[in-house]
């Protein structure tokens, strides 16, 4: 177990200046030469902080008060800011958030990846700072209260609305609260999902036990309301549906995909479309390309890219996502897609053994990244790899591994999908 620094323990409350932001909900200052991470702070703040934990390389602090506020600080417009854990950067001006995200990408690539020769482009700001989320996940406690986890805790913060949630999602919170009050079945969490059309809003309720027969009429009444037109109730093994369980998302103006609401989709629809525009511009797809897409989901990029290339091999582990992708491909007459339902590491092995060749590879892995896949990716001998990431640290690790396989990192394009949080999307282009 790490030992506390005894000198710091003698004086647990300190005044310090915040000089930077971490990739996380903390500002960084120094006490006695050691980095101290303090939440709800901004670069340039002079604050008082109480030390709550000390590690060998850093300490964690709790904000006691702001002695002198930074010019980067603003009054959070959300009434739950500081208590709710969803938007830890609402106290920062948006320009400061963008600067911090740009720096976090560059720092990860240089410090973690050991990468130096690349073109880091200015971060692309979100179209909307607020009401950009098409999906929100609400927690439910035994008293049927709806809300989000508190900052750095599992304590529920009850909410009436969410400032970064789209308007249709917020309109659904009160009807859900009334529905929960009528239920005999215990619900753990509810995901609200909205589509492009005004009447597309689906609630996805998660519980340990299936919806009880006595609650059927309440579920039917919920989807007959003017606010929610679909309900999916899920346990670990069962799925029940009332009303219309799908939404429509246009990844391009003439390509509206119909997707089950419980299949993964990007929360920021405008950001998703901008990512597609950046991807197509940088990778320069053409009609002779053979494309391998890894972690393809329900075809978010697969369907639009299939219209630009000769053939796509699309790999995804989630069966429901693949099923959605196939239905949309059939609807739009996309016959040049081979869908593979498998974990990506397992799918790559036979492609390498068969000496399959692809001119370009697109991968969009989850936060954990694509650790251990660099050698197999390189064996496919694609001229271009486009890597889309939601975590700078795992991106840096994987880009370093690909560079050791002979790939050169070129353009790196950060994008802000998640204003008022520290999360950042990044598109990186590698060539060989």
Image (cartoon, helix red, strand yellow):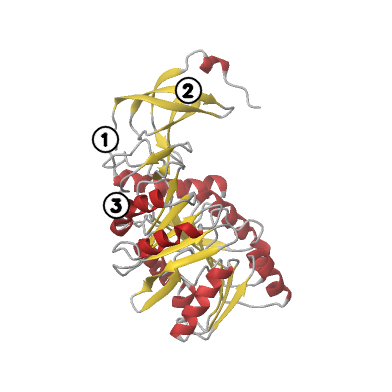
Residue that protrudes farthest toward the right in the picture = 353
Q: Which residue sits at x=31%, y=57%?
A: 166
Disc 1 on helix, strand or loop? loop
Q: Are marks 3 and 2 in contact (CB under 8 Å)?
A: no
Disc 2 on helix, strand or loop? strand
Spatial distance from mark 1 to mark 2, Cα to Cα? 25 Å
The x, y position of residue 60, in whole percent, is 49, 28
Task: Please report whichever mark, 1 or 3, sits nearer to the chain's N-terminal start.
Answer: 1
| Above-or-below relation of 83 to 10 | below
Report crowding for label 1: few under 14, some 14 to 19, many 20 or more residues within 10 A (C-alpha): few
Q: Which residue sits at x=29%, y=55%?
A: 171
Spatial distance from mark 3 to mark 2, Cα to Cα? 33 Å
The x, y position of residue 186, in whole percent, is 49, 49
Would residue 54 be visible to someone looking at this image?
Answer: yes
Q: Which residue is mark 3?
A: 130
Residue 284 falls in image quadrant: bottom left
Would residue 361 be visible to someone looking at this image?
Answer: no
| Above-or-below relation of 79 to 60 | below
Report crowding for label 3: few under 14, some 14 to 19, many 20 or more residues within 10 A (C-alpha): some
Spatial distance from mark 1 to mark 3, Cα to Cα? 21 Å
Task: Please report whichever mark, 1 or 2, sits nearer to the chain's N-terminal start.
Answer: 2
| Residue 71: image tag | 1
Q: Are marks 1 and 3 in contact (CB under 8 Å)?
A: no
| Above-or-below relation of 68 to 178 | above
Residue 222 falls in image quadrant: bottom left
Report crowding for label 2: few under 14, some 14 to 19, many 20 or more residues within 10 A (C-alpha): many
| Residue 51: image tag | 2
Q: Which residue sits at x=41%, y=41%?
A: 85
- Quadrant where the N terminus lies? top right
Nearest the camera: 390 or 104?
390
- Quadrant where the C terminus lies? bottom right
């Amino acid at each position: 177990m790490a030992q506390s620094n005894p000198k710091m323990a003698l004086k647990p409350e300190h005044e310090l200046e915040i000089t930077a932001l971490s990739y996380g909900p903390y500002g960084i200052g120094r006490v006695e030469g050691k980095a101290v991470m303090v939440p709800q702070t901004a670069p340039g703040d002079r604050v008082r902080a109480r030390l709550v934990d000390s590690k060998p390389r850093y300490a964690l602090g709790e904000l006691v008060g702001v002695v002198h506020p930074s010019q980067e600080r603003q009054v959070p417009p959300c009434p739950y800011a500081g208590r709710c854990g969803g938007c830890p950067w609402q106290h920062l001006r948006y320009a400061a958030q963008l600067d911090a995200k740009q720096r976090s990408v560059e720092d990860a690539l240089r410090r973690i990846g050991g990468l130096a020769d690349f073109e880091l482009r200015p971060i692309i700001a979100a179209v909307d700072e607020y009401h950009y989320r098409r999906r929100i996940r609400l927690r439910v406690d035994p008293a049927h209260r709806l809300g989000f986890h508190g900052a750095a805790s599992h304590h529920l913060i009850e909410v009436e609305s969410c400032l970064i949630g789209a308007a249709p999602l917020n309109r659904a919170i009160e009807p859900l609260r009334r529905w929960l009050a009528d239920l005999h079945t215990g619900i753990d969490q509810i995901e609200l999902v909205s589509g492009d059309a005004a009447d597309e809003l689906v609630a996805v309720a998660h519980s340990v036990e299936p919806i009880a027969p006595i609650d059927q009429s309440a579920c039917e009444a919920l989807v007959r309301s003017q606010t929610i037109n679909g309900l999916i109730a899920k346990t670990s093994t069962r799925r029940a549906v009332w009303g219309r369980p799908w939404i429509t998302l246009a990844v391009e103006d003439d390509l509206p995909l119909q997707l089950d609401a419980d299949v993964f989709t990007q929360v920021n629809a405008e950001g998703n479309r901008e990512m597609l525009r950046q991807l197509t511009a940088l990778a320069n797809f053409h009609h002779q390309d053979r494309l391998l897409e890894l972690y393809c989901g329900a075809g978010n990029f697969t369907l639009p890219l299939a219209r630009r290339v000769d053939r796509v091999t699309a790999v995804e582990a989630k069966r429901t996502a693949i099923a959605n992708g196939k239905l949309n491909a059939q609807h739009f007459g996309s016959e040049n897609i081979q869908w593979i339902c498998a974990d990506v590491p397992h799918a790559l092995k036979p492609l390498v053994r068969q000496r399959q060749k692809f001119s370009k590879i697109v991968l969009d892995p989850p936060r954990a990244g694509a650790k251990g896949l660099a050698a197999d990716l390189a064996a496919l001998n694609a001229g271009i790899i486009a890597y889309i990431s939601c975590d700078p640290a795992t991106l840096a690790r994987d880009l370093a591994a690909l560079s050791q396989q002979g790939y050169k990192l070129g353009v790196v394009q950060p994008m802000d999908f998640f204003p008022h949080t520290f999360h950042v999307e990044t598109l990186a282009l590698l060539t060989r």
